[in-house]
């Protein structure tokens, strides 16, 4: 969606230490399910300066499937790891695309911020308000960009629904 499309362009634009507009943005996918794999591939297709270096998943079959799909769609195969700490310790990776099960979203986001990575995390971002607050605090403290996959909030149907509600016709 729109958020994913704009994400790649925004990573280096606002991050400290920007080298230049033509530099590659290096991503890692953490959680290799169909949602994460599909959205990261879509992002790379519309952002020529974005590449996926690593796919991380505890399930080797899922990771292999994501790597095969990336190879088919983008023409190259990222490396595979099973521990997200390997991704977070990799200085070549600029940002992570978190598509793990929801109960991992907050902790993975906080760890990524601490590691100096920008973050795109699929919805739902947290399982409670406290986790959300900690994600915000981490993004602010480590001066990272964190974006949540709430694309439906910017979809045309959401705007038309909002206009209808504001018009007073709802009831």
Image (tube, rainbow, N blue to C red):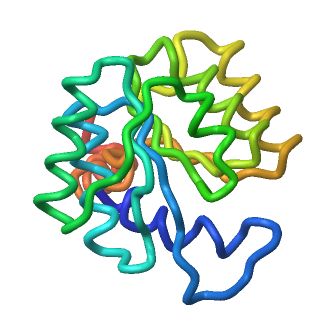
Against 142, is 25 above or below?
below
Q: Along the horizontal axis of the image, is 13 left or right of 42?
A: right
Outermost residue, left direction? Answer: 72
Q: Residue 108 lies in what quarter of the image?
A: top right
Q: Quadrant of the N terminus?
A: bottom left
Q: Along the horizontal axis of the image, is 127 left or right of 155?
A: right
Q: Along the horizontal axis of the image, is 84 left or right of 32?
A: right
In the image, what residue occupies the spot 18% across and 57% down?
71
Q: Position of residue 166 (x, y in %)?
A: 39, 49
In the image, what residue occupies the spot 76% across and 23% down?
134
Q: Position of residue 21 (x, y in %)?
A: 60, 87
Q: Quadrant of the C terminus?
A: top left
Against 110, is 126 above or below?
above
Q: Position of residue 3 (x, y in %)?
A: 41, 57
In the image, what residue occupies the spot 43% across and 47% down?
54
Q: Position of residue 83 (x, y in %)?
A: 51, 24
In the image, what residue occupies the spot 30% across and 74% down?
46
Given residues 29 and 2, the one toward you in this image is: 29
Q: Residue 122 lies in what quarter of the image?
A: top left
Against 52, is 20 above or below?
below
Against 133, is 45 above or below?
below
User: How many labels were placed on the picture?
Assistant: 0
Given residues 90 and 151, the one toward you in this image is: 90
């Amino acid at each position: 969606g729109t958020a994913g499309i704009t994400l790649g362009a925004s990573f280096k634009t606002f991050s400290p230490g920007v080298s230049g507009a033509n530099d590659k943005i290096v991503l890692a996918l953490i959680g290799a399910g169909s949602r994460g794999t599909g959205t990261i591939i879509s992002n790379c297709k519309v952002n020529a300066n974005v590449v996926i270096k690593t796919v991380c998943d505890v399930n080797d079959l899922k990771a292999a499937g994501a790597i095969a799909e990336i190879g088919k769609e983008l023409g190259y195969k990222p490396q595979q790891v099973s521990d997200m700490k390997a991704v977070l310790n990799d200085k070549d990776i600029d940002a992570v695309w978190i598509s793990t099960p929801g109960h991992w979203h907050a902790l993975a986001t906080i760890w990524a911020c601490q590691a100096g990575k920008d973050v795109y995390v699929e919805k739902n971002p947290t399982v409670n308000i406290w986790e959300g607050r900690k994600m915000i605090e981490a993004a602010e403290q480590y001066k990272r960009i964190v974006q949540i996959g709430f694309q439906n909030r910017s979809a045309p149907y959401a705007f038309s629904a909002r206009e209808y509600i504001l018009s007073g016709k709802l009831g």
